[in-house]
Image: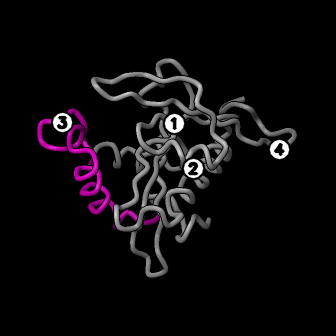
Amino acid sequence: MQGGTGRVTALETVPGVLARLETWFVEEWPGWYGPGGAGDASRDLGACLQAPGRLPRCLVSLDGLGAVIGTVSLRDTSPGSDRYPGVWLTALLVPPPLRRTGIGTGLVAAAEAEALRLGFSEIHASTANAQSLFRRRDWIVHDSLKIRETVLDIFRKPLQTSPGKSERPGS
C-alpha cells in the first residue's frame, strides 16, 4: 500500500526496523517510554508481532531504499478508549526532519484502510498536536480530555464500508 511518499506495510513484514522504532518511541515520548516512564516500547511494538492480522497492529512507512520513515499503530486502548471502545489510531510518528512531507497523512490513510479491512466501521484518535492532519482527512472532533496538564482532542472518523461487509469484528 502507498502512503504519502513511502510504501506502507505491516511491522511483521519488516521486523528488522523494530530497534529503530523503539529508539524513536523513547525519543519522541520520553515521559512515557523513557527512563522511569510507565511505558515499554519493546513490549508495545512486540505485541504487534504476536497476532498478525489482529489488534494491535503496527504499520510502517518505508522509503524507496527500504528505510523506515514513519509509523502508526492501531490498538483498542488509548487515552479516551474507556469512553469510546473500538479501534484507535495511536503512536503516529514521523521523524522531525521528514514531517510535513505527506508521510503522516499517508500513514493515517493506511491506518484507516487497515481498520476497515479488520471490520471496524469507525476509528478514533486522541491528540494534542496533530489536529490539522486529522481534519484534512475528514476526522471530526467529538470530545476532549485532560491528562495532567495536557488537553487532548478526541477525533473519530466513520469508515466507508462496502455493502454486505461486516460492521464489527466477529459479526
Q: Which residue is mark 1?
A: 125
Q: Position of residue 32 (x, y in %)?
A: 24, 38
Query: Separation of disc 1 and disc 2 at Cα?
Result: 11 Å
29 vs 110, left or right, is: left
Query: Separation of disc 4 and disc 2 at Cα?
Result: 17 Å
- Secondary structure type for disc 1: strand
Find residue 111 and name its label.
2
Asked if the magenta segment contains residue 101, the reply would be no
Q: Position of residue 91 (x, y in %)?
A: 40, 46
Q: Earlier in the sequence, mark 4 or mark 3?
A: 3
Position of the C terminus, as image quadrant, is top right
Q: Which residue is mark 4?
A: 162
Q: Which residue is mark 3?
A: 37
5 vs 122, left or right, is: left
Q: Earlier in the sequence, mark 3 or mark 2?
A: 3
- Secondary structure type for disc 3: loop
Q: Earlier in the sequence, mark 1 or mark 3?
A: 3
Q: Amino acid at mark 1?
A: Ala
The furthest residue to the bottom: 65
Identify whether 94 is placed above or below 6: above
The furthest residue to the top: 83
**Magenta-highlighted residues:** 13-41
- Secondary structure type for disc 4: loop
Q: Amino acid at mark 2?
A: Ala
